[in-house]
Image (cartoon, grey):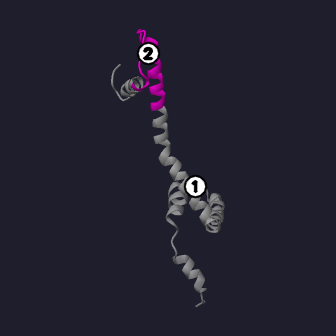
């Protein structure tokens, strides 16, 4: 009987990572893509380990932007609606007296929130 290298036995017993099994065995991606993917994964993990603080701060800033973006868009659209409503009221009112600014703002805000003019 020949003696086997103990390291080769461990390599034979290790299973493939789930994503390698899925992409390269089940789906059938070309094997030549596996090495560049593994190489870039190694570089990425090394880069992330070396720049942990920068990556963390960048992710926090990105998440804050993603969180506040819909709020800012809604406010911008609402402000535009109020401005358009004010100009509409001022252009269509045929009275000689101009409505007060507070009343006009309240009226425009009410219209933009679903009310009628």
Mark 2 and mark 1 residues within 8 Å of each other at the beta carbon = no
- Mark yes or no: residue 41 visible: no
Per the rendering, the mark at residue 29 is 1
Q: Position of residue 86 (x, y in %)?
A: 45, 21
Count of number-bearing discs: 2
Residue at the spot 58% in from the left edge and 59% down from the top edge: 57
Closer to us: 54 or 2:
54
* Left or right: 74, with 20 as reference point: left
Closer to us: 109 or 70:
109
Q: Which residues are magenta?
A: 78-102
Residue at the spot 50% in from the left edge and 59% down from the top edge: 22
Which quadrant would the C terminus be assigned to in this image?
top left
* Left or right: 3, with 98 as reference point: right
- Mark yes or no: residue 49 visible: yes
Q: CA distance from mark 2 to mark 1?
A: 71 Å
Tag 2 secondary structure? loop
Earlier-in-chain disc, 2 versus 1: 1
Residue found at the far left of this picture? 115
Other-residue count near label 2 (Cα within 10 Å), few / some / many at <14 / 14–19 / ≥20 = few
Mark in front: 2 vs 1: 2
Q: Position of residue 62 (x, y in %)?
A: 55, 52
Per the rendering, the mark at residue 98 is 2
Looking at the magenta stretch, what is its main secondary structure? helix
Q: Name the image quarter holding residue 34.
A: bottom right
The stretch drawn in magenta includes residue 77: no
The stretch drawn in magenta includes residue 101: yes
Tag 1 secondary structure? loop
Q: Position of residue 113 (x, y in %)?
A: 36, 29
Q: Position of residue 55 (x, y in %)?
A: 60, 60
Closer to us: 94 or 78:
94
Which quadrant would the N terminus be assigned to in this image?
bottom right
Q: Can you say whether 94 is above or below 24 in the image?
A: above
């Amino acid at each position: 009987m020949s003696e086997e290298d103990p390291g080769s036995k461990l390599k034979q017993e290790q299973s493939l990572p789930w994503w390698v099994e899925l992409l390269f065995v089940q789906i059938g991606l070309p094997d030549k893509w596996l090495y560049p993917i593994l190489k870039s994964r190694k570089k990425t993990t090394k880069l992330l380990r070396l720049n942990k603080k920068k990556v963390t701060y960048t992710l926090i800033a990105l998440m804050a932007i993603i969180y506040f973006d819909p709020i800012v868009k809604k406010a911008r659209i609402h402000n535009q609606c109020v401005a358009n409503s004010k100009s509409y009221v001022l252009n269509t009112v045929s009275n000689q007296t101009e409505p007060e600014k507070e009343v006009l703002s309240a009226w425009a805000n009410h219209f933009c929130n679903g009310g009628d003019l």
